[in-house]
Amino acid sequence: MKKILILIIPLLLAMSLYAVDFDISGENRTRAALFNSITEDDGAFIDNRFNLYLDSQLHRDLCLHAGVQVGDVTWGKGNAGFDTSLEVAIKELYLDYAIRSWDLNIQFGQLYWRDRMGLIIDDYFSGIMLEKTFGENLNTEFAMMKGREGAEDANDDVNYFMIHALMDGDMPWGTYLFFYNDALTDDYALTLMPYFGLELENLSVDTNFWADYQEYNDDKIGIGAAVKAKLDLTDFVLGADVLVAAKNGLSVISPWYDNGLYIYGIGEHHDGLNLYWNNPYTLNSDFFASMVGEIKVPFKYDMQFFGHAGYLIDTGMEVNAGLEYELIPDLFNMALYGAFGLNDDETKNYAFGTTLKLEF
């Protein structure tokens, strides 16, 4: 705790002294899970983390943003019987400089960014991001992401370059262009990922396509698509999630694609039980498909039931269900869930858990 105070208090004082405007937000998440492994061995754990975000408007054109994470801590995990140590990590730390005459924002430092579905990246990175608006609807982003810094006097770094253009509106559409380069091995990849969306009164659709050219010893091509759809019928919400990949799949940086499953994917209320996921659409030599259906049924103003059923080709199937409850509206939420999975080799898996989340 002393390390936390030593780190946070000077940062708060400095930002508050020099800020025109100062804002604090954060999230505390505690979750427990009971499940069995791919060898059907039973297990359970509890973990929690705390994220604190600080925004300081130093000038009308300059903002300092910092994000601090305390944890992730798995209760009792360590060399001793009782482990109370907490790891403090600076996840975000960047300056945001606005050049208003050009409608341009420049961010540099340690940043967070994700593509529209988290297919390629949903993570923190060190680098530079430029955001520029053209007219009323065209938004663009340009980024250089440092993947690896090798020897300072050698050309052996790993870099990612990204261009993103979005035409916003009721039918948003755009495209991502990623270029990966490893100067040490001369490996590289070029990814084109266009997308379009549809936003109606009760229907939303997001569709991503990709074509991926990869140079890893041999020239390879990857293609695929992902579709997420939601239909809000007031009394209940229906959803669908479909992901397909062929040839050599997709080159990724640090993805976190949420398909709603807990055993065969990444679910909303726990992303650490994905026993069989491991990004199967990445650098795959065979055809892959994941198909998931979703339902949500609100039955009180602060409570709703949810469920998913999904099948992953050559992997298995899963059904899950749970309950979301707002203990304190817009502040403190709880979720309970259970899942059952049947692998293609007839291995049976289960998962039960609860998640408490405080957001302010």
Image (cartoon, helix red, strand yellow):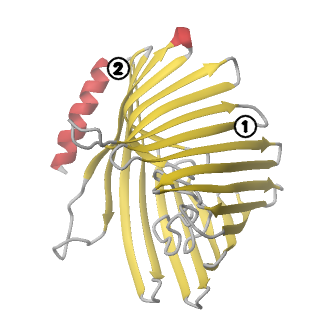
Q: Is residue 299 visible?
A: no
- Toward which corner of the image does residue 306 lie, by quadrant? bottom right
Tag 1: amino acid: Trp
Label for residue 19?
A: 2
Neighbour tally class for label 2: few under 14, some 14-19, many 20 plus, Cα within 10 Å: some
Label for residue 59?
A: none
- Tell me if 312 is positioned left or right of 238 in this view: left
Label for residue 173?
A: 1
Measured in 3D between alpha carbons, the distance from the residue under mark 1 to the one under mark 2, in whole angstroms, is: 37 Å
Image marks 1 and 2: residues in contact by CB distance under 8 Å? no
Q: Secondary structure at mark 1?
A: strand
Q: Secondary structure at mark 2?
A: loop
Neighbour tally class for label 1: few under 14, some 14-19, many 20 plus, Cα within 10 Å: some
Instruction: Name which of mark 1 and mark 2 comes first in the sequence.
Output: 2
Q: Return the x and y of residue 277 as percentages of the image width and height.
A: 53, 69
Q: Return the x and y of residue 340 as percentages of the image width and height.
A: 60, 82
Q: Return the x and y of residue 190 as percentages of the image width and height.
A: 55, 44
- Which callout, 1 or 2, points to the residue nearer the camera? 1
Tag 2: amino acid: Ala
Of residues 42 and 174, which is closer to you in this image? 174
